[in-house]
Image (cartoon, rainbow, N blue to C red):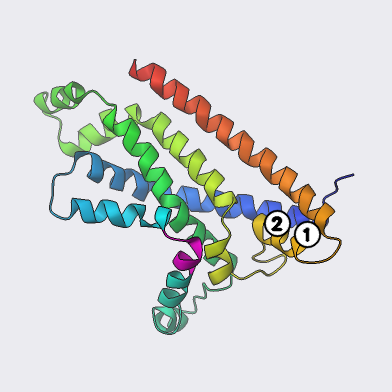
Amino acid sequence: MLTLTSNDFQALMLSARVAGLATLLALPAGFLVACLLSYGRFRGRALLEGLVNLPLVLPPVVVGYLLLLGLGEAGIGPLLERFGVRVLFTWYAAVLAALVVGFPLLVRSIRIGLEAIDPQLLLASNSLGAGRIDTLCNVVLPLSRRSLLAGASLMFARCLGEFGATIMIAGNIPGLTQTVPLAIYDYGSVPGGERLALGLCVASIALSLLVLLVSERLARGRRSEAT
């Protein structure tokens, strides 16, 4: 029989909290970056697009190591310490790792929705005297709400499974920074931990499947609106 321990529930709650906070923090920047890549015409656009998508092709451990360097003694670590801020090996580091790794999925999903908006609507808004900010807030944002929600759900699901970058900058501290993937890794590396690992795997699959079903339903609604 599959069972979950108190540590497992802590890992599940921490994973959900990390994924949720990372997604909420990424939404405003993700929407603005998606708008720049969809509507912007400027030098360096290809470079920006490459940088945004870079975490998709880099191994998560590489992303985590780069974050470790940036937040460590060779980076902004000493500056943060002056203000009494500690990020490395806290659950805030897990949020940062999840945010960086999941951000490209959020941007790509929002871009799909933005590029599906009828350009005639934007031209009509401009012809009626609306500025860029008015058009963005009153036309683009309402029409892309399903893309925002779909992108947020995809990023949330990706953040739930983040392992490589998290273990590099947050560590694997039970009750503090140990998310579900890290707990499964622990169980899988000790004799007799297979049953506990399987229980967490089943719980993780169920949660991720629920999020993906929500994302698919939103995507279908987005396609029906476009037609």
Q: Nearer the viewer, residue 99 or 197?
A: 197
On screen, residue 31 above or below 144 = below
- Residue 62 among those drawn in magenta: yes
Q: Residue furthest top?
A: 227
Element at label 1: helix
Residue 70 image offset from top left, x and y in percent: 40, 75
The verdict on residue 93 being magenta is no
Kind of element beneath mark 2 = helix
Image disc number at residue 7: 1
Asked whether, in this view, residue 161 is left or right of residue 143, the answer is right
Residue type at mark 2? Ala
Residue at the (70%, 56%) spot, across then down? 11
Image spot of residue 29 (x, y percent): 35, 50
The numbered mark at residue 11 is 2
Mark 1–mark 2 CB contact (< 8 Å): yes
The magenta span reads 58-64
Which residue type does callout 1 highlight?
Asn
- Residue appearing at x 42%, y 53% in the figure: 56
Question: Which disc number belongs to residue 183?
Answer: none
Q: Residues within 10 Å of mark 1 (few under 14, many from 20)?
A: some
Instruction: Name the quarter where the C terminus is drawn.
Output: top left
The quarter of the picture where residue 109 lies is top left
Toward which corner of the image does residue 124 lie, by quadrant?
Answer: top left
Determine crowd level at label 2: few under 14, some 14-19, many 20+ residues with C-alpha closer than 10 A.
many
